[in-house]
Amino acid sequence: MKRRELVIVGGGPAGMAAALAARAAGVEDVLLLERDQHLGGILNQCIHPGFGLHHFKEELTGPEYADRFAALVHADPGIEVSLRSFVVKLGKDRELSYLRPGAMEDIQAGAVILATGCRERTREMIPIPGSRPAGVFPAGLAQKMVNMEGWIPGREAVIVGSGDIGLIMARRMALEGVAVKAVIEIQKTSRGLVRNVVQCLEDFGIPLRFQHRLTAIHGADRVEKVSVVRVDDDFKDIPGTAFEIACDTVLVSVGLIPENELLEMAGGAVDRRTNTPVADEVNLTSLPGVFACGNACKVYDLADSVTRDSELAGRMAAKYLGVPA
Amino acid sequence: MKRVMTCIECPQGCRLEIEADGSRVISVTGHKCKRGDKYARQETEAPLRTLTTSVLTRGLELKMLPVRTSRPIPKDKLFDAMRAVKTIVVTSPVKTGSVVAENFLGLGADLVACRPLDKL
Ligand SMILES: Cc1cc2nc3c(=O)[nH]c(=O)nc-3n(C[C@H](O)[C@H](O)[C@H](O)COP(=O)(O)OP(=O)(O)OC[C@H]3O[C@@H](n4cnc5c(N)ncnc54)[C@H](O)[C@@H]3O)c2cc1C
Ligand code: SF4
C-alpha cells in the first residue's frame, strides 16, 4: 500500500485552507481528494456575493472566493490534487480507499483531514403531509440546478424556511422571473442574516410569514397549491387561520447536516442528533490522526470562518505528524 | 422625514436611521463603520445593487458561467439586466475577471466572469 503523509478528503474551502496551512507548517506531501471535477465544493453553486469580507476585506461571490484558494493550491508543488476521486473507505488506522476514473486506489495516510462538508436535510426529515407530486425540491439542490444547469424549476414558488439558503434562493428565483409567493417560517425570526432578509426579500416584495407552518402540499402529478396555518408561541396551529397558496414549486430549506459517513466507518464517534464528530475541541475526532474541519465538523454560516478554523486543522495535522521535526 | 433601514454592506446588518428631505440626506446614525453612512446616502438617493447570475456557455467545461457586474447598478435596472443576460452565450475560455460584456446595458459596468472555465 502506498504511503502518503497527509490526505485531505474534500476540496471545498475547508479542504483547500487545511492543505495550504499544513504546507505552510512544513508538511511536505499533501494529497487532496475531491470527487467533483473542480475544487471549490458548495461555493461553486453559491454565485451570490457575501464571501471573503473578513479574509480578503472585500466582498466576493462564492466561485471567486473558491478560485483564490484553488489558484494557490494548484500552484503548490507539495499538494497533489486528485479530482473525480471519491473516497469510499476509511479504516481506524487511516487506511483509505478511493475511486478515480478507471481505478481503485488504496493508500495508508500518516494523518487524515475530513473536509467533506454537509448535505441538505430533506423533506423526509421534517414531515410535511400531503401527496408526493413533482415540484418539491431541497433549496440547495434547486440552487445547483438554477445556477449551474440553467434549469428553472417552476413558475410560482413557495419557500419553506427562512435560513440564508432559502432567502438567497428566493431572490435568485425572483430574478429568473419566478413569482415567489411567500417564504414560510415557523419561528418568530429568521435564522438568516438581516441583510439577506432585506436584499433578498424586501427588494423584491416577497412576503416573509413568521410563525406560519406548511401543513400540506397538494397536487396530483405536479404541485398545485400548499396549505399554510399560523402557529402560536408553542408551535400549535391557531384555529381559523388556515389558508392556501397556489404554486407549482416548493423549495424546502430546512438546514444542513454534516457528512461524516467516513468517520463512522472508521469507528469514530459521531453525535446521533447533529451528525458531528464527538470530540473536545474543534477539528478533532475521537480517532488519533483523523481530523474533521469545515462543515463536516459543524455547520458554519460563513466561509470566512470555515477558512480560519480549517487553517488551524491543517496546523493540528502537521503537529500530529511531528512537523517541523 | 425619518427613515429606518438595514445596512446590507456586511453581515453586521446595522440598523440605520436617516434624516432626509426627500432624497437629500441630512444625517445618518446607527452605522458601525463609514460604509454604512455611504450606503444610507446612496440608498436614499438612488439604490444600487451588484447583480450576480450565470450565463449559458457552449463548448466549455460547465454549462453555465457565474458572472457579476463589475460595480453595482441601479436597483430598478436589475430585471432589464437579467433580460440582457439571457441573450449572451460564452464560447471561449475565460479567467476570473474576464469581461463577458463591456459597458453592460450602457450602465458603465462590465459583466465579468467569477471563475475560470476551460474548453470541454
Ligand atoms: C446555499 C449556501 C449559501 C451560503 N452562503 C454563504 C455566504 O453568503 N457567505 C458565506 O461566507 N458563507 C456562505 N455559506 C457557507 C459556506 O459556503 C460553507 O460553510 C462552506 O462552503 C463550507 O465549506 P466546506 O469545505 O466545509 O464544505 P463544501 O464546500 O461542501 O466542500 C466539501 C467537499 O467535499 C467533497 N466530498 C465530500 N465527500 C467526499 C468523498 N467521500 N470523497 C471525495 N470528496 C468528497 C465534496 O464534493 C465537496 O467538494 C453558504 C452555504 C450554502 C450551502
Ligand atoms: S454600517 Fe458598517 S458594520 Fe454596519 S452593516 Fe454597514 S458595513 Fe457593516
Image: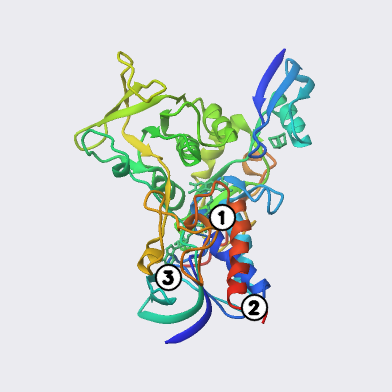
Q: Secondary structure at mark 2?
A: loop
> Callout 1, which amino acid?
Pro
Q: CA distance from mark 2 to mark 1?
A: 32 Å
Dot label at residue A323: 2
Q: Which mark is residue A84?
A: 3
Cα distance, mark 3 to mark 2? 29 Å
- Quarter of the image where the N terminus of chain A is located: bottom left
Instruction: Tell me the CA gap for discs 1 and 3.
Output: 19 Å
Tag 1 residue: A63
- In the displayed structure, A186 sits above or below A80; it is above
Examine the image and state in which quarter residue A156 appears: top left
Q: Is residue A8 above or below residue A49?
A: below
**Percent position of residue A27, x then y:** 62, 77
Q: Amino acid at mark 2?
A: Val
Residue most toward the right?
Answer: B26
Element type where label 1 sits in the image: helix
The answer to whether residue B95 is seen in the rendering is: no
Foreground label between 3 and 2 = 2
**Horizontal and vertical percent for residue A314?**
60, 67
Question: Which residue ends up furthest to the front in the rendered image?
Answer: A280
- Give residue A262's position: percent from left, percent from top: 39, 66
Circle 2 or circle 1, nearest the eye? 2
Cβ of mark 2 under 8 Å from ligand 1: the answer is no
